[in-house]
Amino acid sequence: MALSLILASTSSISQGITTPRTPSPAAELKQTIEISTVTVNYSRPAVKGREVWGKLVPYGWNSQGFGSGAEAPWRAGANENTTIKFSHDATVEGKQVPAGVYGLFFVIDKDNTGEVILSKDTRSWGSFWYNAKQDQMRAKTQLRDIPHTELLTYDFINATKNSAELVLNWEKKQIPVKVEFAVDDIVLSNATEELKGPVGFNWQGYASAANYALQNKANYEQAMKWIDHANAQNRNFTTLNVKSGLLKATGNTAEAEKILKDAIAVATEVELNLYGYQLMGQGEHDKAIDMFKLNTQRHPTSANTWDSLGEAYATKGDKKNAIANFKKSLSLNPPANVKANSEKFLKELGAL
């Protein structure tokens, strides 16, 4: 009877509430690379004064005396499998990896080199049942020395448009893994799918897709189809300006100039102003001044147009014309933000 009571008590406790897991707490790291994401789920053991590399984490491949008993890599954390998820097809240390979730393992060698392994096995506990036949990829990696990190920590560093470096930091070692995405291909492929839905019901969707391709010098042929579709729906400054840019990028300069004139002819005050600043950003100060002048002619009572023209002259170094236009802006009872900008430049030019 006593034994029965003990077993009943133990069974009841084993089905109790969820309690905190203090040793090696669970963690999740998520990094966005343009529209793709990488998510790492792992546990965080602490150093606690122990010798980590070569002891707690043995060098090389090791049989752990449990599970399959085969030579296995390190679990890259603690407790359950460390996993890594890619939202799109990726390149990991130069190796192609399809989108999906993978078990993440490392082999650490005494000479500060190592190996990263992605496995299709994502549900095992640690690496006790590691099976090399489940490997998706393996690649060499070079460890780095870093300041002491008590809790095992994953992070992303050295981010660019197309890539980021996933690093494991623990004790005084860092293990880097470069992750890359074919961003432009992914964005344009995604655009194709999005344009089949509500986004494709208006001209803005097609124009934004075409403009992305133009700005990133990607798939001009498809971009031209998209912008023609946008112009068929709504012929305006934005759609015509993107069409002009694509024509210029593909070598049709004469037609590009013609379409640009059509775009400028229908531009609103805001659109023409933004285009002027775009030209300024490209270092085309004289063209920018021409656009701002045209805007003052079309909208002579707008303080903002004169303020922008003054800014273009100031950027070019034409102090006299800059001062005249900033004063003209102030004479038109400008909004607070425009007034503040004109006064700031006039003070810098010594005219206020």
Image: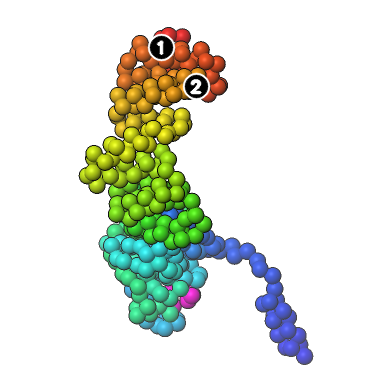
Question: In this picture, is 153 found above or below 54?
Answer: above
Q: Residue at x 37, y 33 (%)?
A: 264
Amino acid under disc 2: Ser
Residue 208 in percent (x, y) is at 42, 48
In the rendered image, which residue does mark 2 sit on? 302
Q: Quadrant of the N terminus?
A: bottom right
Query: Residue tagged by mark 1?
Result: 324
Closer to the chain start, of discs 2 and 1, is 2
Q: Residues within 10 Å of mark 1 (few under 14, many from 20)?
A: some
Which residue: 32% across, 70% down? 137
Q: Position of residue 209 (x, y in %)?
A: 40, 51
Which image quadrant is residue 322 in? top left
Q: Is residue 36 left or right of residue 332?
A: left
**Is label 2 in a helix, a strand or a loop?**
loop
Disc number placed over residue 170 in the picture, else none: none
What residue do we see at 34% from left, 27% from top?
A: 288
Task: Using the rendered view, name the quadrant where residue 296 is placed.
Answer: top left
Q: Where 321 falls versus 188 (above or below)?
A: above
Quarter of image, res 118: bottom left
Give the residue furthest to the left: 251
